[in-house]
Amino acid sequence: MAEAVPEGGIERHLQQAAAAGRQHVTEWSERHTAPHFQTDLWFVVTDENGQKTRIPACHAVLNINCPFLHSFQAGDDVEIPQTICIDALTVVYFLWLNYPRLPEAESPFDTLVSVTSSTYGTSLRNYDENKMVELCVAIPKLAKLADWIQCDATIGRLEDIMERTVLERVPLREGAASKYLYMASFALSDAKNEDGTAYLKEQDYELVDEFPAALIRMNEAERERIADHVAPMFEALLGGCSSRIQRIDATGDISEVYKDTEYLSEELKLLVTVAKFLLNSYKEARSGPAPS
């Protein structure tokens, strides 16, 4: 199996990917301001430094998938709030996903998906964690933008990519990619107005069991991004632990050992009780001080 990439190596890769992304934005803008392209709509995205980028698009093409744009006229600027998107590359990825596919011009987002899809083998020898992280970072941004523009087609495409590429290929117990998997999954479930915990349980209950390890690897900003999903995930984890303890007590030869000592069974029950207490404390802290 390929060795996990150190966190610093992933950060460097994301910086390099961002630099390459600026070139993708330039290429899109140059291509779609050419005379043979119909450009009559401009997306305006403002980055964290206040720098605005105008990205050309075709109103007639986007109208097919994006009801939000029906209220705009040809020639309008579509100002994207900073709370929705500050990354011009995300807008370009979104446009590629909603334009007809041209054989002579492959989308850089499709290229990223195809690379991560093809680096999968029986032993994951060719698994590229850097590229998988890059994909998992792009998905939440795209999901948020697509939700704002009311583009169900893009959200459906992202869901397919999550299920066929990300969830099937990220090793949960190794490397840094798993924490990005959870952030991408929760962002996608938010865009669909669905319970993120239920979404992950539908895919594989192991995704619930491994969540605490991924949460530990997140920094404070990353944890805050998924804060609404933390308590439901731990509740699901504790529910699974409780059912497993009950099965140990009630069935098989193992339970005969516990009838004599009851030591391990009681220890596990105590651990669950403490965990529930800590979970309730976490939920109370997030809800703010009690009213006086």
Image: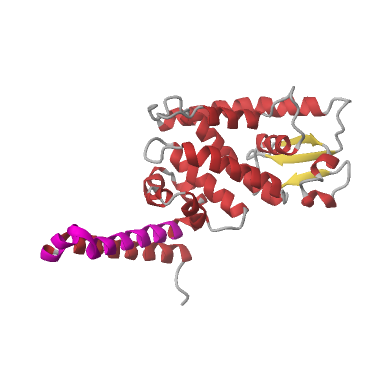
Relative side of 99 to 11, left or right: right
- Residue 242's image quarter? bottom left
Q: Could you tell me which quadrant the N terminus lies in?
A: top left
* Residue nearest the observer in this picture, 134 or 286: 134
| Residue 190, above or below 43 | below
Whether residue 171 appears in this view of the structure is: yes
- Can you give x and y, in whole percent of width and height, for residue 97 in the image? 70, 37
User: Measuring 53% from the left and 27% from the top, which residue is drawn there?
Assistant: 118
- Give the colour scheme shown: secondary structure
Residue 291 percent coordinates (x, y): 47, 75
> Considering depth in this image, is 223 or 164 the residue closer to the camera?
164
Q: Residue at x 45, y 69 (%)?
A: 289
Q: Quadrant of residue 5?
A: top left
Q: How many marks?
A: 0
**Residue extent of the magenta highlight:** 232-260
Looking at the image, the residue that sits furthest to the bottom is 292
**Is residue 97 inside the magenta stretch?**
no
Toward the viewer: 248 or 142?
248
- Name the residue at the left extreme: 260
Q: Looking at the rendering, which quadrant does residue 250 occupy? A: bottom left
Q: Main secondary structure of the magenta part?
A: helix
Picture residue at 53% right of the left edge, 47% below the top: 185
Residue 82 visible from this viewpoint:
no
Q: Is residue 254 magenta?
A: yes
The correct choice, above or below, for 91 with respect to 182 in the image is above
Q: Residue furthest front?
A: 252
The vertical placement of 146 against 138, above or below, is below
